[in-house]
Amino acid sequence: MPRPEPVSSIYEATAELECLYPARKFTLDGHLVSSIGEVIAAEALGLTLYPMPRAGHDAYDANGDIQIKMMGGSSVAMYATCDRLLVLRVVSPQEAELVYDGPGAPAWERAGKMDKNGQRVVSLSRLRAIQAALA
């Protein structure tokens, strides 16, 4: 069954991304946004990505381990706290905004109650407030 051209383009782009970043999977089943966020952060901030899968942290730099989250909405879900949390928000097809870059504990402490799936959600506005308080 043929795919519409825009859908084919997405699959072609993910195949190209997997060639460029072989330590990441860009599957369209949930890894895509996460992996895109990880490579954007790594490229922009000079981070080293851990091989997949690795629980808790996605990358590291001279200051330690980092968990990277990227989303298009107004909140981010977390399974646990982390050493350092970096949160990106999709602004446009060409741009991502760095919303939060700081310790994971304050974000985890200010997140909502644990959902049935074991995740806690924290809003981007709350992360921005935490970031401002840390400055």
Image (cartoon, helix red, strand yellow):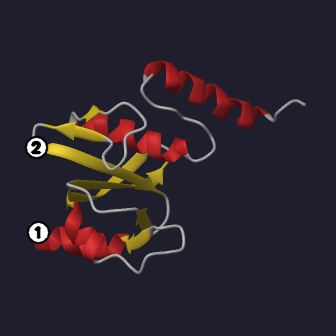
Q: Residue at x 29, y 36 (%)?
A: 42
Instruction: Decide if residue 78 is on the left or right side of residue 84.
Output: right
Image point 42% across, 53% down: which residue?
70
Q: Is residue 100 above or below residue 19?
A: below
Residue extending farthest right = 1
Residue 19 locus on image (x, y percent): 50, 19
Confirm or deny contact between disc 2 and disc 1 (CB under 8 A): no
Callout 2 amino acid:
Asn
In screen coordinates, is 3 left or right of 48? right
Label 2 sits on a secondary structure element that is loop
Give me the C-alpha separation between circle 2 and circle 1. 17 Å
Residue 28 in which image quadrant: top right
> Which residue is disc 2 drawn over?
63
Residue under label 1: 134
Residue at the spot x=73%, y=30% of the render?
8
Quarter holding the N terminus? top right
Camera-nearest residue between 128 and 79: 79
Q: Secondary structure at mark 1?
A: helix
